[in-house]
Image: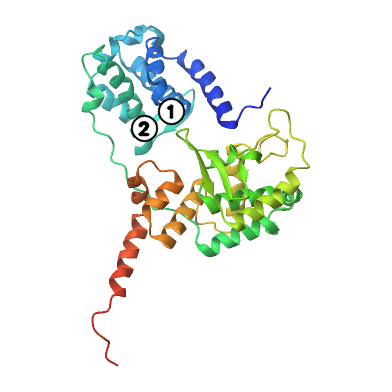
Amino acid sequence: MKEKAYHEKVTITNAVRLRDQMKFLPRFCREYFLGIEPSTSSRTRLAYAYDLGIFFEFIHDNNPVYHKMTVQEYPLQILDDITALDIEEFMSYLKYYEKNGVEHTNDERGIARKLASVRSLYNYYYKKEMIEKNPPALVTTPKIHEKTITRLDIDEVAMLLDQVESGEKLTPRQQMYHEQTKRRDLAIMTLMLGTGIRVSECVGIDIDDLDFKNNGVKIHRKGGAEVIVYFSDEVAIALLDYLEERELIEAVEGHTNALFLSMQKKRIQVRSIENLVKKYSKLVTTVKNITPHKLRSTYGTALYQETGDIYLVADVLGHKDVNTTRKHYAAQADERRRMAGKIVQLRDKED
């Protein structure tokens, strides 16, 4: 039997998790998830399910009428009974709440995402004229405060790759494993810094996705699209060096085609790459909290500074809307405009 690709395994895993999560939702939600399946990813549907679970649990705990019923017994009529004020109270609740002895908090992004999940549910039934009201449409989305882009400077990128290669600043315990993983780690870090791919896209790469004739790698974008991303000779060298080692490793069944393997000889996981990025970046900077996404920002910034082409940056990073890219790199655009203002000289300067 042909080994399933990583993105296919993720889709199956998310489908199973969604079925489990739906056990805690009103029964009418099954129709909603079937209805949105053609237009959403498995990851999005699972996120909606978790968010809706929190929403209906809040209604159960705070609404005296529906407190007498289990969440699973809620009729579709509940959506018409809930008011905009109820939803605003839910948004306030999300800032801090406790569940099973665990404290939970949400910033404006977390609250906005959960509001979007509730809106999606309402929009589905409202468009089908199965409910009469749409209170989430009356609620204002929280104002999102833009964060400053955290990225590595050019010298920090070089220092980071040097540390991955040498491992000289690692703890004695970390150095015990470094010799076994340094080629893999260097290939991962060089690839991510040299292409700006997402950590999930990196994890999903198979050996036969690599094309060294054209220096390209096939990846599966977040929305499901399959694209070729191109890389430099520097990235190619790091990948080829690792491949010499990878070809000698007999991977666990079901992981034989995975490019990057864990020490257990299975496809490396997203959390593992997050941990190795954190481990090495702390050797270079203790001020910046560097994550795989920050490596992506580092690449995007460098590409924009070199080309000044926001559309190229958006295309390479896989942003569906160029405004997303423009929003992230507005500071660099302003810097370039300032530079342009100084370049043009109208009259010769007098000595």
Find residue 144 and report its image quarter. Answer: top left
On the rendered image, what quadrant is the C terminus found in? Answer: bottom left
Tell me if residue 204 can be seen: yes
- Residue 39: x, y in percent? 39, 25
Query: Measuring 37% from the left and 7% from the top, which residue is drawn there?
Result: 69
Residue 71 sits above or below residue 49 on the image: above
- Residue 231: x, y in percent? 56, 52
Query: Measuring 27% from the left and 87% from the top, which residue is drawn there?
Result: 349
Query: Measuring 38% from the left and 60% from the top, which residue is drawn there?
Result: 308
SS for callout 1: helix
> What residue would you read off at disc 1?
44
Residue 204 sits above or below residue 89 on the image: below
Residue 70 sits above or below residue 50 on the image: above
The label nearer to you, 1 versus 2, is 1
By what rule are the colours in the image chosen?
Answer: rainbow
Q: CA–CA distance between discs 1 and 2?
A: 11 Å
Q: Residue furthest bottom?
A: 351
Residue 20 sits above or below residue 256 on the image: above
Q: Residue furthest front?
A: 213
Residue type at the position of mark 2: Arg
- Residue 234: x, y in percent? 61, 58
- Residue 114: x, y in percent? 36, 29
* Label at residue 113: 2
Residue type at the position of mark 1: Thr
SS for callout 2: helix
